[in-house]
Amino acid sequence: MAALGGKLTKRLVENLGPGRHGDGAGLYLVVDPSGARRWVVRVTVKGQKNRKGAPLRTDFGLGGADVVSLPQARERALEYRRMAKAGLNPRFNAKREIPTFEELARQVHIDRLPTWKNPKHAQQWLNTLRDYAFPKIGRMPVDTIGQPEVLMCLSPVWTAKHETATRLAQRMKTVLDVAKSMGLRSGENPVTAVKEAEVLPKVKARAQHHDAMPWQDVPAFYAELAKRSATAAKALQFTILTACRTSEVLGMTWPEVDLEARLWTIPSERMKGGATHRVPLTDEMIAILEPMKAMASEYVFEGQKRHSPLSNMSMLMLLRRMGRNAFTVHGFRSAFRDWAAEAAGAPREIAETALAHQVGSEVERAYARSDLLEHRRTLMAKWSLTVTKQHH
């Protein structure tokens, strides 16, 4: 067996900047923006096809560059290529040293990348583990992690950052579940055991209330807003009147709008709940939309760049500039909801449908297939009047 050689050197491995650096023969050094370095080998498994029928090419994590040296990485890569050549999937056939928690977590992350809806979620998944688990248990082989180690990661953040801690627990559990499915662990998942033993203090789940302006104050604020000409102000007026989410308003395009029918139809892929949502348009809403047509943009509320929407933060920054620091844009949905219950006496299902919330059980929903458009048209017209009564 001739000595393995490639393009990389020990010095390069230590000093290369972020990116994927090839050593040759499918071995890469991947350097994250954070500076973390790990080995990945890409192999094509002979005779195996991916879902599209092309040859199956797969990336395997070979461990962190601080733990696995360049010669070791080349050796492992060679072993993986031999198996792939023989038609064996390395995932099930590699002579395994037990990977560390960090190595396996990074592998799970690579494997799941195609399934995440957006890169940000994928990155958050890894960052949670990087910040709270790797420093404590990252270098431990996955078969040595038990309840004490899980507690060591969770305890410090359990009460102070409870939401983070629950995500951390979920993500650690996933990594250890994968370890079990690969035959690297047996028995109950220690994350589950820790939760069931209730050793961590009960944390009262505080519902995340988006700080909402009391609905009684909305008309005065709206009047102030109506004096502004910026697109962000128009978008915020429209958001308040429709009680829609920021993303729904900012992503709004002209083909979704039917001024004749006084209707805005938001396609399912733009909705949080994944179902098409119809918004009845009132006179006041149409008065905001009409002048926007002159922009001749793809988007109703165009941002800095031609044919692209306003930035996600634009309305929040406007609230800040107007001195309403305590409130969020999302809070106007709550203000509408409170008004609908307290002032309009609207039935729950109509108010909830106006917010595009799913109402009731599966059964109730099967009976309530209608989106109650005409009832909502009346409700939104009343809301428009309430909101605008001080500036007409």
Image (tube, rainbow, N blue to C red):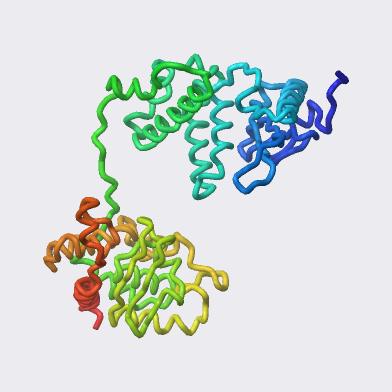
Residue 34 versus residue 70: which sits nearer the camera? 70
The N terminus lies in which quarter of the figure? top right
Q: Position of residue 194 (x, y in %)?
A: 34, 21
The residue sitting at 65% across, 27% down in the picture is 90
Q: Farthest front residue?
A: 47
Left or right position of 357 against 269: left
Quadrant that contains the C terminus: bottom left
Q: Is residue 361 above or below residue 143?
A: below
Place of residue 364 in the rendered image (x, y in percent of width and height, measured from the top left): 20, 55
Horizontally, is 32 left or right of 322 in the view?
right
Between residue 296 and residue 218, name the one nearer to us.
296
* Residue toward you, 54 or 206: 54
Percent position (x, y) of residue 137?
50, 21
Confirm whether residue 43 shows in the render: no
Q: Quadrant of residue 265?
A: bottom left
The image quarter containing residue 78 is top right
Count of numbered tags: 0
Q: Is residue 157 visible?
A: yes
Q: Nearer the viewer, residue 115 or 249?
A: 115
In the depicted structure, whether residue 323 falls above or below residue 73: below
| Residue appearing at x 33%, y 58% in the figure | 330
Residue in the picture at 35% in, 85% down: 260
Residue 336 placement (x, y as % from top left): 23, 64
- Residue drawn at the location 67% of the way across and 24% of the way down: 66
Q: Is residue 380 above or below residue 148?
A: below
The image quadrant of residue 237 is bottom left
Residue 49 lies left or right of residue 359; in this view the side is right
